């Protein structure tokens, strides 16, 4: 089976405001950014798209605009709180989403014990397990990657998400049997940065027991602080 996939951290507005993101400056009206994200995703043709940092407002927009898509959602128990500026969202809850063009069987949706604002949601399509995840960017990732390995080690599987680490560190953390797809040398960053030492390639497509090809990072024109990653599996 051949399946197209994508992963994109769409940036929750409260995180953008709390960290003084330039995205918040570029989009002073969050409703317009939400519409831009929805329009971008409505134009995508991938069978499965993993989305991180989805606000309640963004999720409602996607569901309204794409009623034919199937949504598999993890509702995080942690709800982001504004620290710098007033909340501009009607629904500031945060979600991890797998958006499917077609249908799939949901396996589970679980926040990490070590971080109630990150976790995983998993589905199965024709014997392939597909997992969306958002991994914490500190040493808590060790146990989180172990949980993801346990979830995917028994058969063909694909992990999609924001891992907050570069390809080499992720490959070492998951261990034998996993292939972290390699970006072409001319790829634009998945998470562009103007400063700091953190990797600019932290969003990944990981395979277990299945080939991955045609990995591409696509510019989202500033709708988020992450770009979208596309690949073909199988």
Image: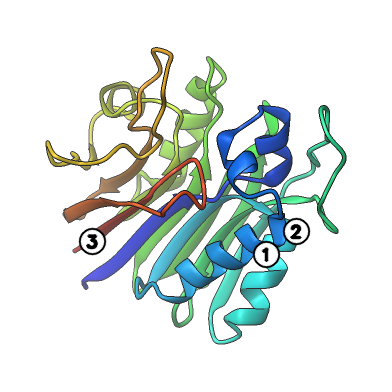
Inter-mark Cα distance, 3 to 2: 30 Å
Q: Where is residue 159 in the image (x, y as percent from the top left)?
A: 38, 48
Residue 155 can be seen in this image = no
Please determine whether, in this image, residue 106 is positioned above or below residue 207: below
Q: In this view, does 27 lie above or below 45?
A: above
170 on left or right of 18: left
Please, what secondary structure does the residue beneath circle 3 have? strand
From the image, tell me which residue sits under label 1. 59
**Residue 127 can be seen in this image:** yes
- Which disc number belongs to residue 56? 2
Residue at 64% over, 41% down: 24
Residue 26 lies, in percent from the top left, at: 58, 45
| SS state under label 1 | helix
Where, by quadrant of the figure, is residue 87 drawn?
A: top right
- Image quarter of residue 61: bottom right
| Camera-side residue of 101 and 33 | 33
The residue wearing badge 3 is: 233
Label 2 packing within 10 angstroms: few (<14), some (14-19), many (20+): some
**Which quarter of the image is occupied by the N terminus?**
bottom left
Instruction: Locate residue 189 relative to residue 23 in the image: left or right.
Output: left
In the rendered image of this protein, does residue 118 appear above or below residue 228? Answer: above
**The C terminus is located in which quarter?**
bottom left
Residue at image location 75% in from the left, 59% down from the top:
56
Q: How far apart are marks 2 and 1 (CA)?
A: 5 Å
Of labels 1 and 3, the one closer to you: 1
Q: Residue 111's x, y, as percent? A: 67, 42
State how far apart marks 1 and 3 are (Cα).
26 Å
Where residue 64 sits in the image (x, y, percent)?
Answer: 67, 80
């Amino acid at each position: 089976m051949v399946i197209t996939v994508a992963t994109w951290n769409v940036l929750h507005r409260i995180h953008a405001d709390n960290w003084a993101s330039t995205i918040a400056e570029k989009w002073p009206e969050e409703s317009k950014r939400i519409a831009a994200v929805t329009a971008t995703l409505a134009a995508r043709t991938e069978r499965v798209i993993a989305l991180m940092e989805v606000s309640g407002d963004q999720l409602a927009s996607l569901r309204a605009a794409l009623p034919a898509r199937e949504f598999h959602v993890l509702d995080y128990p942690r709800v982001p709180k504004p620290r710098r500026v007033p909340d501009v969202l009607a629904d500031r809850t945060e979600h991890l989403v797998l958006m499917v063009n077609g249908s799939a069987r949901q396996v589970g949706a679980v926040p990490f014990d070590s971080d109630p604002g990150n976790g995983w949601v998993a589905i199965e399509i024709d014997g392939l397990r597909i997992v969306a995840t958002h991994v914490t960017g500190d040493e808590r990732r060790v146990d989180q990657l172990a949980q993801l390995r346990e979830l995917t080690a028994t058969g063909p599987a694909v992990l999609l998400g924001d891992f907050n680490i570069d390809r080499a560190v992720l490959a070492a953390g998951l261990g034998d049997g996993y292939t972290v797809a390699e970006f072409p040398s001319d790829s634009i960053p998945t998470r562009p940065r103007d400063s700091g030492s953190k990797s600019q390639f932290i969003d990944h497509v990981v395979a277990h027991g299945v080939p991955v090809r045609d990995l591409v990072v696509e510019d989202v024109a500033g709708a988020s602080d992450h770009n979208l990653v596309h690949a073909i599996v199988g």
